[in-house]
Amino acid sequence: MKTKWLVQTNVLGDSPTKDQLREACNAEGLEFIGFAHPPGSRCEPSIAVEHAKGPIVFHARSSALLGALGTIWSSGVFFSPESFCHEAYAAHYGSDYINHQAIVVSWDELVGTRGTRDEHLFIKPVDDYKGFTGQSLSARSLASYFEQLCSRNPQITRATEVVVGPAIEVDAEWRFFIVGNEVVSASMYRPVGDPSVPKPVVDFAQALARGWSPAQVYVLDIGKANGRLSVIECNCFNASRFYCADIRRVVNAVSEFQQKQYFIG
């Protein structure tokens, strides 16, 4: 029994992911099942129940993935909040994690204690739900930025925790797709898209993947800053972009992994 891919198709923006997955599934002889989901809703995805039979892989926006957890669709989601978070990266990667010296504070504390200083900070969410994009900004702009976030996302409040650390200029970033602790494909995504990745960067990512993984299938982002390679973050595979990676190879590896898990289970 082959793996089925359940892919959210009503995604906003210019992401080519759904079309790339459709093409890869067609090329690999895999069933592609598109579904729509209310934007921002964490309700269970509305998909015909018969599609839950056999090995499946989910690919959707974070809200739909959260709605799938704990349901008949959860076998196709590679995610746990305890593993995909700043605290886990700091604990397991140590100094190989670029933000290992960052702290976690509430927005209320951050704006109150740092909002009038002349410094640049890096801030990002504590989890993988992507409530906002991690970025560097002036401490004096924290208050106005927070108000903008609240107006766009009512789930962000003054009590919401955020990761804050020194701003670090990253010269290059690569995305690795990890399946069963092995790198199956990768590409540079910053400053440009490039399918070729230097061997030292691949070796670094592979060593990390064999040391600790937040899930059996996930995305590992590696950056180079001040001449040193570091983990930027991990991402849930089910909601990640592919950039210039070999999508057919990724789809094939994940599909085979799910087929083995299904028959073992």
Image (cartoon, helix red, strand yellow):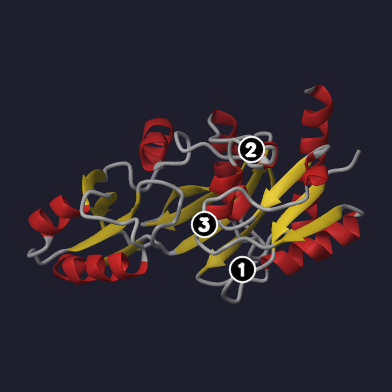
Amino acid under disc 1: Val
* Numbered disc 1: secondary structure: loop
- Closest to the camera, between mark 2 and mark 1, is 2
For disc 1, the marked residue is: 11
Location of the C terminus (image quadrant): top right
Q: Which residue is found at the position 42% from the left and 38% from the top? A: 89
- Mark 2–mark 1 Cα distance, whole angstroms, equals 22 Å
Residue drawn where x is 16% and y is 53% of the image = 108
Residue 219's place in the image compared with 209, above or below, is below
Residue drawn where x is 59% and y is 31% of the image: 210
Q: Which of 258 and 49 is in front in this view?
A: 49
Q: Mark 3 points at which residue?
A: 41
The Cα–Cα distance between marks 1 and 3, rounded to whole angstroms, is 13 Å
Q: Which of marks 1 and 3 is nearer the N terminus?
A: 1
Q: State the image coordinates of residue 199 (x, y, percent, origin top left).
A: 63, 50
Residue 8 is at least partly visible in this image = yes
Task: Give, as a three-letter code, the residue at label 3.
Answer: Ser
Q: Earlier in the sequence, mark 2 or mark 1?
A: 1
Q: Are the residues flagged by discs 1 and 3 in contact, CB closer than 8 Å?
A: no
* Foreground pick, 37 / 251: 37
Q: Within 10 angstroms of label 2, few (less than 14), some, or many (20 or more) residues? A: few
Residue that badge 2 annotates: 71
Closer to the observer: label 1 or label 3?
3
At mark 3, the secondary structure is loop
Q: In this view, does 98 lie to the left or right of 52?
A: left
Measured along the vertical axis of the image, is residue 67 above or below residue 27?
A: above
Q: Is mark 2 on a helix, strand or loop?
A: loop
